[in-house]
Amino acid sequence: MPVRRRRSTALAAAVATAAALGATVLVTAGATTATAAEIPLKDYELTWGVKQTYRDYVGRFGTFTTSDGATQAAGNGAFTFVDGTGTYDTTGHTVDLAFKGGLVSKSAAHGFEITLTDVRFDSKAAAITADVKKVDTSGGAPKTTEGDDVPLATVAVTREMKDMATTLTAEAGEYLGSASYAGAAGDPLTVVQKTPPSTPPASTSPSPSQTQEPSPSASQTTTQEPGTGSPDPSPTKTTGTSPSASASASATATEAATKGEIADGTLGWGVKQTFRAYVVGSIAKGRVTVSGGATQAAGNGAFTFKDATGTYDTDAGRLTASFKGAVNFKGHETNGTYGLDLTLSNLKATLDGGSGKLSADVDSLGTRTPGVVLADLKAESGELTAEKNVITVDDVAATLTAAGAKAFGDFYPAGTALDAVDLSVALSDDAQLPDGGTAGTSGGSGGTGGSAGSAGGGTGGTGGTASTVGGTGTTTGGLTGGGSLASTGSDIPGPALGAAAGVAVAIGAGAVYAARRRRAQP
């Protein structure tokens, strides 16, 4: 008679251990009686090789057989389980996914047949489980042992859910036939969402989900965090086709003085692509508003700040430029109050020998802090070369500082890669900037005071009418090119995971961000 074991107490112990190691209950800001909200997930895949030495052993003396959609990589590689469905907990920022596919490892010579089905990944428990059936014929008469939701490994959960370290459990050792597996390192685990490819109509501009890979964040291009970790893409250029910033020996390469005051200029920066996606997604249900002459590229793209003032010294490789315009991020609205209300304005970039800083005035939930250094900058070259009286430095790497991390509520750790920065400054009034504007005329559509419209939150200024991207797909504030990002899954934070696994990271994490900021205020 077969022995059937129900859900093991080890899984409960794993949950308790994870909680003791730092499970964090994230509170939705502005909702004192909020309940956990779950978002359905689908089309996920789980890839795990269990343990390479185990595969080598079975491969020498037996076989692996996959079924019901599961596959094994060539060369006796890892196994992939498909059609993962489950939920994303927006309160705890965790996922619980179940996958299709079966795996049978069998060796007639050694008298065992082990079947795994119903493979599951629970980031809150930080565990991989499966239904396991083991038939042991090594003693003559078959002996069958079965278990439901057997914990096979604990997982070091990461936000990107790629190459996560695993540790095999005692149960894994028992079912796989080697007590030495208990506590041993398993193969890395990867969980990704497989989004069906789509081709935009030729007459429309592609949306972020149509031009970017689905994982780790469905709205990232492949620059590899996600993902992202975690690779983050450089945003779509908002300053047009830029001339090379490299030195040129042509007669027209350098026509300006080697040092002086900047006549005009633009700064292109997306802040962080995953943060923009989070704000307008189905969790924050917010919007992004630009004002004071700043603009945003279509499809919730990057921002351009204009009307630069400052100084340059090409011989010394030094540049200091301040830009007009502001961008406001709003989300997590409850009864007219926003849990996330963050405005960046008066951006300033400095470069000295290729290294520098990016700072801004930060207004969060009504508290204004001027001149916060948000990012460290690193250009590809330390040289500054003027071509046709314009200095252009593109793809400047931006890395979040400790002060910048605080501005985002400490949910992006210092050292996180932000979107790259593009700089173009004119050295004379008649210089032509890469976006086609002439120096001194890039202040938007004129007028005074950026209008934030129904979104609110845009910082006023001179030059330009604010525009709004985002919202929930209504006629005002709908995402350009096709509504909410919810259908692509890009608003599920990467996914943002790991409350009980000690990760507790949300891309943007607006609700918790707001709660922390409010606690810090008198």
Image: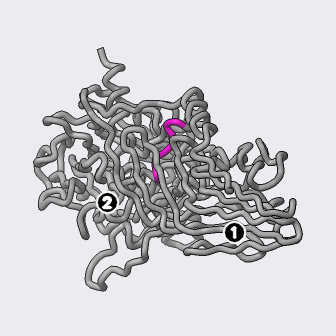
Residue furthest to the front in view is 1
Q: Which mark is residue 335?
A: none
Q: Residue at 69% x, 69% y: name it.
A: 104
Q: Residue at 53% x, 45% y: name it.
A: 123
Label 1 sits on a secondary structure element that is strand
Instruction: Tell me the quarter of the picture where residue 112 sits.
Output: bottom right
Residue furthest to the bottom in view is 202
The answer to whether residue 25 is seen in the rendering is yes
Is 208 located above or below residue 123 in the figure?
below
Q: Looking at the image, is mark 2 or mark 1 earlier in the sequence?
A: 1
| Residue 179 belongs to the span the image colors magenta | no
Q: Residue at 26% x, 50% y: name it.
A: 288
Instruction: Tell me the quarter of the picture where residue 130 sits.
Output: bottom right
* Horizontal side, residue 480 vs residue 446: left or right: right
Q: Nearer the viewer, mark 2 or mark 1?
A: 1
Q: Position of residue 465 (x, y in %)?
A: 15, 53
What residue type is disc 1 on?
Val
What residue type is disc 2 on?
Ala
The residue to which callout 2 is attached is 486
Q: Position of residue 522 (x, y in %)?
A: 29, 14
Q: Nearer the viewer, residue 479 or 75?
A: 75
Q: Position of residue 390 (x, y in %)?
A: 43, 61
Q: How is the image coloured?
A: one colour
Label 2, label 1: how many angstroms apart (C-alpha)?
Answer: 37 Å
Q: Nearer the viewer, residue 427 or 421?
A: 421
Q: Nearer the viewer, residue 448 or 212?
A: 212
Q: Residue at 50% x, 58% y: name it.
A: 98
The magenta stretch is 495-500
Residue neighbourhood size for the residue with mark 2, other residues' Cα within 10 Å, grouped as few (<14), some (14–19), many (≥20): some
Q: Position of residue 96 (x, y in %)?
A: 47, 50
Q: Nearer the viewer, residue 397 or 330?
A: 330
The residue to which callout 1 is attached is 104
